[in-house]
Amino acid sequence: GEKNQMVLNALEEGRIVPYFQPIVDVNSGETHIHELLMRIEQDGRIVPAGEFIDIAESIGVIHRMDYMLIEKAFKQIHVQGYTGTLFINLSPRSLIIGEFINRIHQLALDYEIDPKRIVFELTERETVSNLQLLEKFVLDLKMQGFNFAIDDFGSGYSSFHYLKQFPIDVIKIEGEFIRNMLNDDKYLAFVKSIVTLAKSLKVETIAEFIEDEAVMNAVREQGIDYGQGYHLGRPAPDFLI
Ligand code: G
Ligand code: G
Ligand code: G
Ligand code: MN
Ligand code: NA
């Protein structure tokens, strides 16, 4: 349909653009971490990923878009001299293409980016057809020094499976839990249990969707390490440093 063509044209014409959202250390306030977010530039408008990622996955071009975005982001990091850490969303569909991880490793070499500064976010948004293959490639990347986070932790069926099976460094707590933790004790209980779990596994935590100061304070009180959300900084085409 029309949307498929929009995505294909954007890819063909190189209109996939990187946006960066800050991830803030809740204790020090330091911002040396950003999440890379995909956008399409379309007739002077910036189209957010939520409007086209599903389509890109279903028509089988997400790995090409992920690759193009990562190349542009690495180039920008190199040119701007950004020294922080970058979180990168990857569709499992991209990861299970063997050639993909070799090319990512090569990009890191080309743009002189230490894999230790890269954290790949795994999500459960899409069911993974070949978990064994995914595990193999995650371990390969981990061996090269790249890190891994579970995105939207708590929202899906396989959060615990990912935690058990993959070498996870960071848990990003589902935004819905954070957003509701102050007005619903059930969500607060979820958050508390995730923080306890993370601490006992020595995994760091990030709270998503922090939209006001009250939630930011609650996040700090619960012992969560990092925060992200419109209250702290919106996605932008440049690093907010
Ligand atoms: O940025 P936005 O709120 O539109 O993100 C919507 C969804 O798209 C989120 O689930 C996010 O993880 C995903 N997403 C954002 N950027 C990328 C990307 O670069 N690659 C992939 N595969 N998914 C992304
Ligand atoms: O699934 P994932 O966590 O990758 O989705 C990230 C997306 O969530 C970002 O692209 C951004 O557009 C959106 N986002 C980031 N911070 C906030 C926030 O505080 N509130 C809301 N509603 N969305 C946010
Ligand atoms: O301001 P901007 O163009 O980045 O807004 C993008 C979208 O995010 C708009 O649809 C807007 O309504 C929504 N938005 C802006 N601020 C917030 C916020 O603090 N929380 C949430 N949930 N959505 C927001
Ligand atoms: Mn994410
Ligand atoms: Na998330």
Image: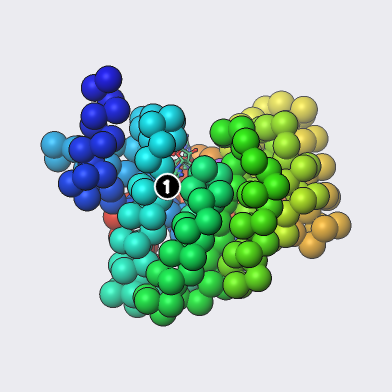
Q: Is residue 117 left or right of residue 150?
A: left
Is residue 228 something that shows in the picture? no
- Residue 48 seen in the figure: yes
User: Where does the image place residue 73, in percent across and percent down from the top left?
Assistant: 35, 62
Colour logic: rainbow
Residue at the image point whose x is 56% and y is 61% from the top: 119
Residue on which disc 1 sits? 63
Residue 35 % position (x, y): 47, 55
Position of residue 146 in the picture relative to residue 64 (left or right):
right
Q: Give the residue at x 82% y 42%.
A: 193
Q: Position of residue 43 (x, y in %)?
A: 13, 36
Q: How many labels does the image show?
A: 1
In the rendered image of this protein, does residue 10 appear above or below residue 55? Answer: below
Q: Is mark 1 on a helix, strand or loop?
A: helix
The x, y position of residue 123, in whole percent, is 59, 42
Q: In which quarter of the image is ligand 5?
A: top right
Residue 153 location, quadrant? top right
At label 1, which amino acid type do we have? His
- Residue at 43 percent across and 71 percent down: it is 106
Instruction: Sort mark 1 into few (<14), some (14-19) or many (20+) by Cα contacts within 10 Å.
Output: many
Q: In this rendering, would 212 be left or right of 127?
A: left
Q: Quick one: 143 or 37, which is closer to the camera? A: 143
In this rendering, the answer to whether 186 lies above or below 86 is above
Q: Quadrant of the N terminus?
A: top left
The C terminus sits in image quarter = bottom left
Q: Residue at x 49, y 65 (%)?
A: 102
Query: With respect to residue 94, does 60 lie above or below?
Result: above
In the image, 191 versus 124, the foreground residue is 124
Q: Most extreme residue toward the left, as rendered? A: 43
